[in-house]
Image (tube, helix red, strand yellow):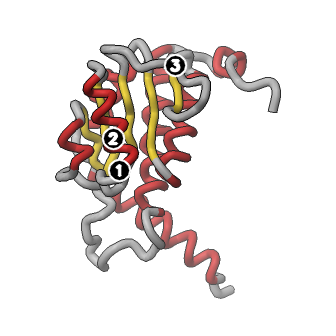
């Protein structure tokens, strides 16, 4: 039976992701894990779909028992010296994200950038860099997907893998994480 257009699209998306993830620079994810564990509080920022990925990660950090917040929410507390801001931007040039990273650094916070642009204003202001190689040409050219889809997909997977490794390192059980899950949805 011939594969449908949908099946071919799924295969293409998965193939692109599996080309990116093995090319992550060594040690960068582990450095982010250490920074997350050392920070008194973690703040996450990003615009558009990058911001949505960040919100997912902040939620998972909360499930792990870390003090995590999304920048811009009305209940977000102040960032203090020693806190960590994770700023997500494929281009590393998103005005709001870069401005928030500069503000956090100015307050004595540490800034971790998750970006595809190693040479960017966001990378320059950051103390840690997790560079996803999604903007570099693949053997067959750039991503077939629209916009930053490949970056956003890989960001979500990388951050979920970090959360899973942190769960193991912290010894958090599913029951402990369930106890932190929202009860009013």
Q: Is residue 95 above or below residue 67?
A: below
Reading the image, the residue beneath label 1 is 95
Crowd band around label 1 with a 10 angstrom C-alpha radius: few (<14), some (14–19), many (20+): few
Q: Is residue 54 left or right of residue 114?
A: right
Q: Which residue matches tag 2?
A: 99
The percent coordinates of residue 112 (x first, y second) are: 31, 34
C-alpha separation, residue under disc 2 versus residue under disc 1: 6 Å
Image quadrant assignment for residue 33: top left
Task: Check contact, mark 3 vs mark 2: CB within 8 A.
Answer: no
How many residues crowd mark 3 within 10 Å: few (<14), some (14–19), many (20+)?
few
Q: CA distance from mark 3 to mark 2?
A: 18 Å
Q: Indicate the quadrant containing the C terminus: top left, top right, bottom left or bottom right.
A: top right
Secondary structure type for disc 2: helix
Query: Secondary structure under badge 3?
Result: loop
**Would residue 86 be visible to someone looking at this image?**
yes
Residues at discs 2 and 1 in contact (Cβ within 8 Å): yes
Assign a secondary structure to mark 1: helix
Residue at the image position 62 percent from the left and 75 percent from the top: 7
Q: Nearer the viewer, residue 137 or 59?
A: 59
Residue 28 percent across, percent down from the top left: 26, 36
User: What distance separates the C-alpha of mark 3 from that of mark 1?
Assistant: 22 Å
Q: Residue furthest right?
A: 184
How far from the left and from the top, in percent, is residue 77? 51, 19
Which numbered tag is attached to residue 66?
Answer: none
Seen in the picture, residue 26 relative to 153 is either above or below; the reply is: above
């Amino acid at each position: 039976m011939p594969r449908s257009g949908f099946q071919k699209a799924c295969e293409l998306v998965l193939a692109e992701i599996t080309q990116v993830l093995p090319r992550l620079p060594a040690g960068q994810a582990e450095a982010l894990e250490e920074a997350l564990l050392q920070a008194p509080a973690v703040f996450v920022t990003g615009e558009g779909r990058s911001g949505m990925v960040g919100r997912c990660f902040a939620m998972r950090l909360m499930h792990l028992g870390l003090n995590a917040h999304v920048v811009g929410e009305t209940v977000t507390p102040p960032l203090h010296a020693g806190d960590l801001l994770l700023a997500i931007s494929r281009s590393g040039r998103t005005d709001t994200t870069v401005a928030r990273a500069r503000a956090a650094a100015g307050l004595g916070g540490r800034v971790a950038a998750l970006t595809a642009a190693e040479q960017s204003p966001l990378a320059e202001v950051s103390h840690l860099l997790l560079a996803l190689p999604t903007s570099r040409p693949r053997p067959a050219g750039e991503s077939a997907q629209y916009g930053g889809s490949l970056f956003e997909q890989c960001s979500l997977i990388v951050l979920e893998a970090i959360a899973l490794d942190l769960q193991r390192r912290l010894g958090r059980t599913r029951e402990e994480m369930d106890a932190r899950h929202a009860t009013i949805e």
